[in-house]
Amino acid sequence: MTIVRDAHGIPSVFGGSVLEVAREQGRATAQDRAWQLEVERRRAEGTCAEVFGETALEWDVLARRALLVDLARRAYAALSPESRAFVDAYVDGVNEILPGGRGGRAATVTRPWRPWTPLAVFAVQHLLFSGFPGQLWRRHLGATAGDEWLPLFRTEGLPGGSNALVVDGSLTASGLPIVAGDPHRVIEAPGCYAQVRLVCTDPEDAFDVAGLTFVGVPGVQHFGHAGDVAWGITNAVADDEDAYAEELVRHRDAVIARGASGWEPVARRLEQVRVLVGEDRYDVHEVEVLVTDRGPVVLGGPGEPGTYSLRTPAFVLGDLGLDAILPLLRARTCADVTAAFAGWVGPVDNLVVGDRHGATEHRVVGRIPRRDADRRWTGTWVTDLPRRTGPVLVTANDRATPDFERVGADFAPPHRARRLRGLLDELAAAGPLTPETVATVLADDRQTAGAALLDTVSSLLDLTAPAARLRDRLLAWDRRMAADSVDAALFARVRAAVVEGLYDAPGLAGVDGSPHGELFAPWFDLRGRLRLCLPAILAADKPFGVDVHQVVADALEQVAAQPVPATWGTGHVVVPLTPHQQLGLPAPEGTAPPYLPLSGDDDCVLATRALGGTGACVHGPVARWVWDLAGDSRWVVPLGASGEPDSPHHHDQQAVWAAGRTIPVKHPEETP
């Protein structure tokens, strides 16, 4: 067993058997990310408040109520014996390194991982990555502003989004397909994805796979290049979960819920969360864990308004779909990859795949429940999920084809997907595509969604001289949200002023703010919702009872009266959030990476979301990857391979990432 690192510290893991590979991957992960592994375990188990204090209590309560550990145990038990042995070997490797380990200058690892812990970590990554917070938001909007405005906000739950594409060999210099993409999430320090290469030298079970893995999860899940075949995903934004409004009451020593046929018993247990209140001093918070016939109660409780249970395919099936890991490592063709994802559960994904035989494909994978007219689950799953082939396939969380109506109703706007396809067509017309040229499209910073606002600006006539000059300047702008652009900063300032004018509409009184606590606040940020849906709002007749032309004119006048801003990149800088910062605490001294200027913006292909529409960026591409079936693959992550701030590989990829570039995937040889 061997771990060999390239110049960026990225590990190539060699093993003489599949279990040796898993064990070495666990060891490599623990060497690089000990403190992150400790945090991820605590997030899964709902014990963050033991380290971070009361600010982490809200997360711990949700993790306990959502039964993440119970789900992980059930999913672990449901794995095939071979998959379970693979996970066990990975955990053995983690535990071989972790005892007494330190990471991030923050805390000593407190206890070893358990066999099911990697599955709990995977579940953590997707608890709030799903659609149910968006369901809560839509109910809140209907209750406060009325259902009439729901169509204007029909879009993916949060701004920004992922991109993935595959082009076949007829368009490439090598004659073989290229698969590429960039997942967009909260930008964390350390990052949620780790670059890794896994090599099994067993002649009866050989594989050599480079890809991205969730830190704490074995194998290569969403993005991988297995030599003869490569794949990647974006979120399909499926309607695969349901948040049920529950009516719960206490009855003697029990809790009961009102169901379709009357009052029903509710499973109940009490758990205790320790909360750090001082050095070696803790309070104990009691959590009531409740499960109705619909699912675990994640919000509220007996007698409380706003009580909801959550029903998900993973909870119903007791399965996370991770039996796909070993077949993916062994895949050789597109058919192998799609067969591996046949048992995928969630999140429901757009899978793009290409192989050296020339096959390319985009299909939706995962479990979407069939429902009756009352949205009750029938116990069966949607089987005719969308699938397409072609020379250029692009997915950007959008409604790619009409048959996506079987997937869901709220998708990302089409701007990114259209821009990606247009760029690829332009590049292909100019000459054969290469990995480097394909990588450039992922860094495209043209603001296409802003066209609706600029069209409205162009129609304004009765403006003061300063506002008219600003209008003309914006209309002459190249629409690139480049870090060195003053015009991009002006556009963002005007857009923010328009959003502020809409925010004050009487019809939206009471909409802003989360009724479910700070953890859900990003989904209930009215300004963010307005900014994302601005094209639809500007096209509506008197949305929320306001004259949008007057709102835009007032915004132009307001911005024209202000000093000209600095360049877009002066304020639009990347802020990778440490675990402390994600919980509202200051980062320990020396643990935060540099803050670099960024291009891009909401609904650019380079979807680097600006807080408030004009500020720092905490959400964007958490990796960028280009899998070349001819072998010249590339990748990059926002920081680096190591989670230790003192390591030379903590953020040695950051400048390349921030500039929209990539580094080559290296394949160092095994050494004795």
Image (cartoon, grey):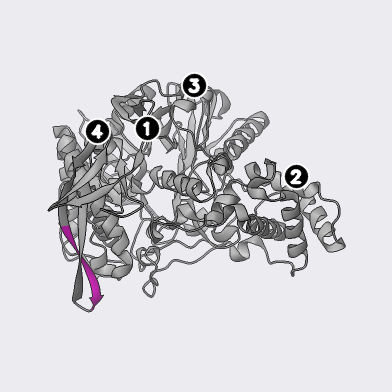
Q: Amino acid at mark 2?
A: Asp
- Residue under pointer 2: 455
Quick check: is 179 in the magenta stretch? no
- Residue under pointer 4: 261
Circle nearer the N terminus (3, 1)? 1
Q: Residue at x 70, y 56 (%)?
A: 491
Which segment is the magenta one?
271-278
Q: Residue at x 39, y 46 (%)?
A: 129
Circle nearer the N terminus (2, 1)? 1
Residue toward you, 130 or 261: 261
Query: Gap in Å between the C-alphas at discs 1 and 4?
Result: 55 Å
Query: Gap in Å between the C-alphas at discs 4 and 2?
Result: 54 Å
- Please rate how many residues cluster around mark 4, counting C-alpha atoms within 10 Å: few if below 14, some from 14 to 19, many from 20: few
Is label 2 or label 1 in front?
2
Circle nearer the N terminus (4, 3)? 4
- Residue under pointer 1: 227
Circle nearer the N terminus (4, 2)? 4
Q: Tell me if label 4 and label 2 are in contact, CB under 8 Å.
A: no
Is label 4 or label 3 in front?
4
Q: Which mark is residue 662?
A: none
Q: Residue at x 39, y 26 (%)?
A: 373
